Image (cartoon, rainbow, N blue to C red):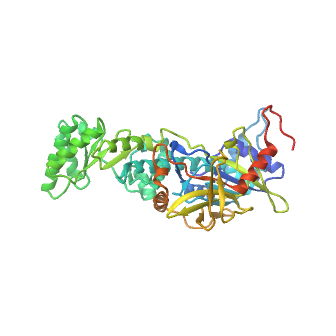
Amino acid sequence: MNSPLQTDLYQLTMAAAYWQAGKADQESVFHLFFRKLPFHGGYAIAAGLEPVLQWLEDFRFATAELDYLATLRTGNGGPLFREDFLSYLGNLKLALDVDAVPEGSAVFGHEPLLRIQGPILHAQLVETALLNIVNFQTLIATKAARTCEAAAGAPVIEFGYRRAQGPDGGLAASRAAWIGGVAGTSNVLAGQIYGIPIRGTHAHSWVMSFEDEQEAFDLYSDAMPDNATLLVDTYDTLAGVDKAIATARRLRENGHALAGIRLDSGDLAWLSQQARKKLDAAGFPGVKIVASNDLDEHLIESLRYQDAKIDVWGVGTNLVTAQDQPALGGVYKLAALRAGDGTWTPRIKLSEQTAKSSIPGRLQVRRYLQDGLYIGDAIYDLDAGIGDGTTIIDPADPIRRKAIPAGGEFTDVLEPVMKGGQRLGPPQSPEAAREKCQDTLSHLHAGIRRLKNPHSYPAGLEEGLFQTRERLLAKYRIPSHGTQKNQ
């Protein structure tokens, strides 16, 4: 269910204050971005845009929601919100323009994934929900892309619904993992809603419900003669492989084929090697070996280096919860306000850490290409524009710069997707976003895609925007003794 109450209280109290101050309709620009790439990686994969657009389209305050807000009280027992403000909310229809990075695109620190333009009250009310959706799905899509990179072309199946953070989190994780590149999911509802291929085996309980493991395998294959992958490690793994081979012979005699066996415990490298030898020697080179058991990209990479004979990787908990970094840390910052004469005034949020100071202006990202690879991203102000050639400056470390010569190939990354609260095109399918992800990864240098100590992709401020930001930092900077500079 989409609801405008999927928000933090301070969004509503600020909205009430904007309305009472007569600022509700002042045009504003906010950007949604993150500062630091997740998983110590070299890139992130943008995801969550389609659910964001659906949430924005559904945005309405229902009577029951307004009635609930009317029950909220201040510390002295009075109503938190005025009746006429709640009446205003009841008639509110969002009038926002949204420009966004397409789902499946590679994104980097400080770059806006969304640019939200419109009345400041409207833009403020949507902050929490947009961050909730984009932060999580971008995190999981990135984790999935890294996991598939580690698998080096072998299929990765997402097995994580039972360990996900609730039903909604599990569904969103399956969607984002599909965008990031997994070949299928065990989540049946995600298959119905998003068209993701469904994959699965059976549990240990199936084998344990019989006195004899061979009987369990045979009866399961009778029920699923063309879709049987047998879990062989309930008791003795290699003995289980022998019994799976007996079942495979029985299937072959009846015109069917065993799809695979699954290893879910023990030394996966050694067991897979031994299982492969047994299967091949018995004449079943086509039977796939599926591995699971708390896998992630680092363990998959390690197992591959150990020459594990694993054909399909089942990844659950570590993928759908992003266990090694369970939050992206995306933020949503005001960047410009429109004056009565129509001009835009940049706004900046300061921090004693320069990297945490926001980037002012109405921002776009220009991505440069050379010989089929991305070579750098320049964040620039739409109103100031950008030259044919430029220098990219890291906002967290101004010493790090990259010169982009004139005449090169480029594309502007953010695209208009909503105007005045109305979607500009049909919904994008998760499959299309998945294809976008595969395409964008193919344009990233292998050094940026590697899991450990990746090359740092040049992404930063266009030199004119960098100077504007420096001027605003100097104007508002708080000196070390704690008093504000008078300028």
Q: Quadrant of the C terminus?
A: top right
Residue 89 in the image: x percent, y percent?
73, 52
Image-quadrant location for residue 274: top left
Farthest-out residue, left: 253
Q: Is residue 305 left or right of residue 65?
A: left
Above or below residue 84? Residue 101 is below
Residue at 61 percent across and 59 percent down: it is 100
Residue 452 in the image: x percent, y percent?
46, 43
Q: Is residue 344 left or right of residue 8?
A: right
Residue 58 in the image: x percent, y percent?
61, 57
Farthest-out residue, right: 486
Q: Is residue 454 left or right of residue 486?
A: left
Image-quadrant location for residue 389: bottom right
Q: Nearer the viewer, residue 158 or 398?
A: 398
Whether residue 96 is visible = yes
Residue 380 in the image: x percent, y percent?
68, 58
Total residue callouts: 0
Residue at 17 percent across and 49 percent down: it is 280
Q: Is residue 434 left or right of residue 390?
A: left
Residue at 69 percent across and 64 percent down: it is 387
Whether residue 172 is visible = no
Above or below residue 85? Residue 427 is below
Q: Nearer the viewer, residue 200 or 285?
A: 285
